[in-house]
Amino acid sequence: MRAKFPYKKKKKRVGCGPGSGHGKTATRGNKGQQSRTGSGRRRGFEGGQNPLYRRIPKRGFNHFPKRRFSIVNLDQLSRLGESEVTPEKLLERRIIHKLRDGLKVLGDGKLDKAIKIHANHYSKQAKKKIEAAGGEALVIQ
């Protein structure tokens, strides 16, 4: 009789004699690699044939590890109203949510007053605008 509920279903008893319906070869068929104990094939194995990952030509160059910066624009920094800006202050004020591999300042927007900015990287335009406003672009290592 078939169980009405899957959690009441009886476990398949493999290799427990001819009466079970899964006896003798225990549902493994006759001979061959999968019929043996301990038979496990690694991922990508194609039965001795040269596998796909070796047949396809390797081309190009992958740059690892790629650095991902948290990005801030100058207009966001000018709205802060601070004379000195650090990554910690930006995290505290929730302008950036994660620091990742560092902070990068981009040159979108205008600076009205001189600001001392601590960051890991600056775009050329951002650096130019900061220095034009009389501020400092300090690089954190």
Image: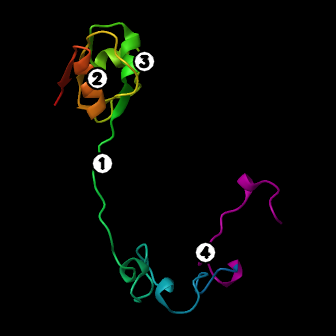
First in residue order: circle 2 vs circle 3: 3
Pointer 2 local density, CA inside 10 Å: few below 14, some 14–19, many at least 20? some
x then y, percent, for residue 15: 59, 78
| 2 vs 3, front mark | 2
- Residue toward you, 66 or 9: 66
Q: Which residue is mark 3?
A: 94
Distance from Cα at disc 1 to Cα at disc 4: 50 Å
Instruction: Please report the residue visible at 40 percent of the width from the left and 22 percent of the height from the top.
Output: 109
x then y, percent, for residue 113: 30, 9
Distance from Cα at disc 1 to Cα at disc 2: 27 Å
* Label 3 secondary element: loop
First in residue order: circle 1 vs circle 4: 4
Q: Is residue 26 magenta?
A: no
Amino acid type for the residue under numbered disc 1 = Lys
Q: Is the N terminus in the top left, top right, bottom left or bottom right quadrant?
A: bottom right
Pointer 4 local density, CA inside 10 Å: few below 14, some 14–19, many at least 20? some
Amino acid type for the residue under numbered disc 4 = Val
Distance from Cα at disc 3 to Cα at disc 4: 59 Å
Residue 102 seen by the camera: no
First in residue order: circle 4 vs circle 2: 4
x then y, percent, for residue 38: 41, 77
Span of residues in magenta: 1-20
Distance from Cα at disc 2 to Cα at disc 3: 24 Å
- Residue toward you, 4 or 76: 76
Q: Which residue is mark 2?
A: 129
Q: Identify the coloring.
A: rainbow
Q: Examine the image and state in which quarter residue 64 appears.
A: bottom left
Q: Which residue is mark 4?
A: 14
* Label 4 secondary element: loop
Q: Which residue is mark 1?
A: 66
